[in-house]
Image (cartoon, rainbow, N blue to C red):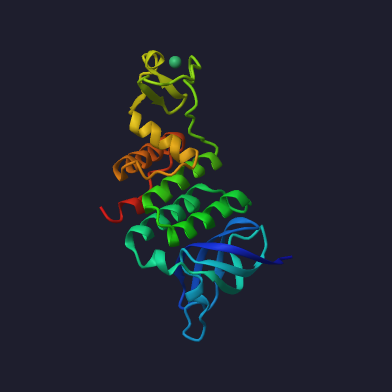
């Protein structure tokens, strides 16, 4: 037996299938990530295939059967299609990076309401906030790390536990966390965290405005978080969409 589900969703990807159909990956509010088929979705008689397009925030109705790999979409309507993101390559690059993380690193059929809401919020910020796109993406990445079970720890040295870190040269060991200069000697693989990068990560975490922090440091923070995620998920090869404009 299959049940009819009506839910909000973000379209993660879309592939041609057969002569007229499409196979799509959706991140849904109710069921997390699902794969679905849109029969006849490429036929010129239907506009359905155009609505179900990557990045779009839609309301979708589908027949769900958890024992089946592909669910069957019956209808879809656009809630938001983010013309501002699609008009700017820089914004689109980060929107695709978000989609890539959710598509590759979240389990199928597992609801994650916080991640769903976080994704919609970040898309609306990318669409209309005056803040730089890389800063908005860095906020998402830090949030995503926490949601996937790998929070970046910045409060104290993870070894000796001192939390007065003023004037201390800091290091980070991907397995253990933040380290003070003294403790870092015992962790061969730890990397230096310069003060600017540390302040940047802290500001991202506390949602402070980042006007005074240079775009270069934000990019450093993104690279740091990407490496951190790679360390914890060996199958993860990095965010391909970030290479889009390089
Ligand atoms: Zn220490």
In the displayed orientation, state which residue is furthest to the left. Answer: 246
The answer to whether residue 155 is visible is yes
State which quarter of the image contains the N terminus.
Answer: bottom right
The quarter of the picture where residue 30 lies is bottom right
Question: Farthest bottom residue?
Answer: 45
Q: Quadrant of ligand 1?
A: top left
In percent of width and height, residue 216 lies at 29, 42
Residue at image location 38% in from the left, 17% down from the top:
184
Give the answer, above or below, for where 207 lies relative to 92: above
In the foreground, 27 or 86: 86
The picture places residue 130, in percent across and down from the top left corner, at 40, 57
Residue visible at 44% across and 61% down in the picture: 128
Is 87 above or below relative to 246? below
| Residue 112 visible in the current orientation | no
Give how far across and how far down residue 2 sits, in percent.
71, 66
Question: Where residue 79 sits: x, y (%)?
Answer: 56, 69
Q: Residue at x 40, y 64 (%)?
A: 85
Q: Nearer the viewer, residue 19 or 122?
A: 122
Q: Name the side, left or right, on which 119 lies relative to 67.
A: left
Q: Is residue 232 left or right of residue 194?
A: right
Q: Left of 204 or right of it: where is 10?
A: right
**Which residue extends farthest right?**
1
Please tell me how many numbered marks the rendered image carries: 0
């Amino acid at each position: 037996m299959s049940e009819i589900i009506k839910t909000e969703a973000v379209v993660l990807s879309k592939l041609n299938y057969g002569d007229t159909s499409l196979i799509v990956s959706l991140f849904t509010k109710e069921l997390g990530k699902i794969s679905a088929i849109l029969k006849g979705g490429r036929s010129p008689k239907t506009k359905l295939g155009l609505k179900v397009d990557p990045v779009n925030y839609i309301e979708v109705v589908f027949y769900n059967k958890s024992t089946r790999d592909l669910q069957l979409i019956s209808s879809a309507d656009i809630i938001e299609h983010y013309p501002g993101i699609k008009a700017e390559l820089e914004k689109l690059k980060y929107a695709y990076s978000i989609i890539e993380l959710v598509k590759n690193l979240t389990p199928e059929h597992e609801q994650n309401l916080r991640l769903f809401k976080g994704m919609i919020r970040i898309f609306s910020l990318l669409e209309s906030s005056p803040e730089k796109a890389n800063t908005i993406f860095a906020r998402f990445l830090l949030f995503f790390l926490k949601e996937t079970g790998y929070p970046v720890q910045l409060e104290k040295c993870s070894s000796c536990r001192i939390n007065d870190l003023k004037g201390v040269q800091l290091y980070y060991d991907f397995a253990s966390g933040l380290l003070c200069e003294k403790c870092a000697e015992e962790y061969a693989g730890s990397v230096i965290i310069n003060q600017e990068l540390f302040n940047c990560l802290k500001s991202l975490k506390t949602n402070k405005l980042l006007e005074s922090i240079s775009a270069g440091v934000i990019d450093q923070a993104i690279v740091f978080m990407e490496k951190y995620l790679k360390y914890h998920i060996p199958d993860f090869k990095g965010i391909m969409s970030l290479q889009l404009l390089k």
